[in-house]
Amino acid sequence: MPKIEIEDGLTLRFPGRDASFHEGVEIGMLATLMATGQPEIVRTISAAALEQAQALAGGLGYRAGDVRPLGADRLSLTLVRRGCRPRLRVVATGAEAGGAAAQRG
């Protein structure tokens, strides 16, 4: 019985329910978040719900970004609203991060 992510740090379980019920809850949560217009959504979903999540995202103006496996049948899915600029991140290589300090010393 998988844990279904409601929000960060809050998960629910539905004992006695089948996989299709769990997928429905996951897709419903995604639809709700997309309806609020958030620029980026990162959720843990079942691998079986991926195709439906991607189709829903396309219909609601989102594109699927990063998809990362989290185990046997779970994955992390990132959805980005179309028209939003990607979040930029500063990335330092090992040489830049530690090398400059070592050369000063």
Image (tube, grey):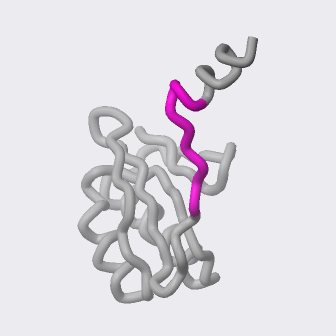
Please tell me whether the stretch drawn in magenta is mainly helix, strand or loop: loop
The residue sitting at 24% across, 67% down in the picture is: 51
Residue extent of the magenta highlight: 88-96
Question: Closer to the camera, 26 or 78?
Answer: 78
**Residue 96's x, y, as percent?**
57, 31
The reply, left or right, for residue 22 in relation to residue 13 is: left
- Residue 31 lies, in percent from the top left, at 49, 77
In the rendered image, the residue lying farthest to the right is 105
Residue drawn at point x = 52 percent, y = 69 percent? 86
Left or right relative to 95: residue 2: left
Depth order, front residue of 15/48: 48
Residues 11 and 98: in front is 98
Q: Residue 98: horizontal and vertical position, in percent?
A: 62, 21
Q: What percent of the width, then of the height, locates residue 44?
A: 46, 50
Q: Does the magenta portion include 20?
A: no
Q: Quadrant of residue 59?
A: bottom left
Query: For residue 100, what is the image quadrant?
Result: top right
Total number of numbered discs in the rendering: 0
Where is the N terminus found, in terms of image quarters? top left
Residue with the most extreme front position: 104
Q: Does the magenta-highlighted stretch encompass residue 92? A: yes
Tell me the quadrant of the picture where the C terminus can be found. Answer: top right
Query: Relative to 15, does residue 26 appear above or below in the rendering?
Result: below
Is residue 73 depicted above or below 59 in this figure?
above
Classify 94 as above or below 58: above
Residue, x 32% and y 52% (percent of image)?
Answer: 19
Does 6 sit left or right of 17 as displayed?
Answer: right
Of residues 21 and 74, the one drawn nearer to the viewer in this rendering: 74
Q: Residue at x 65, y 55 (%)?
A: 7
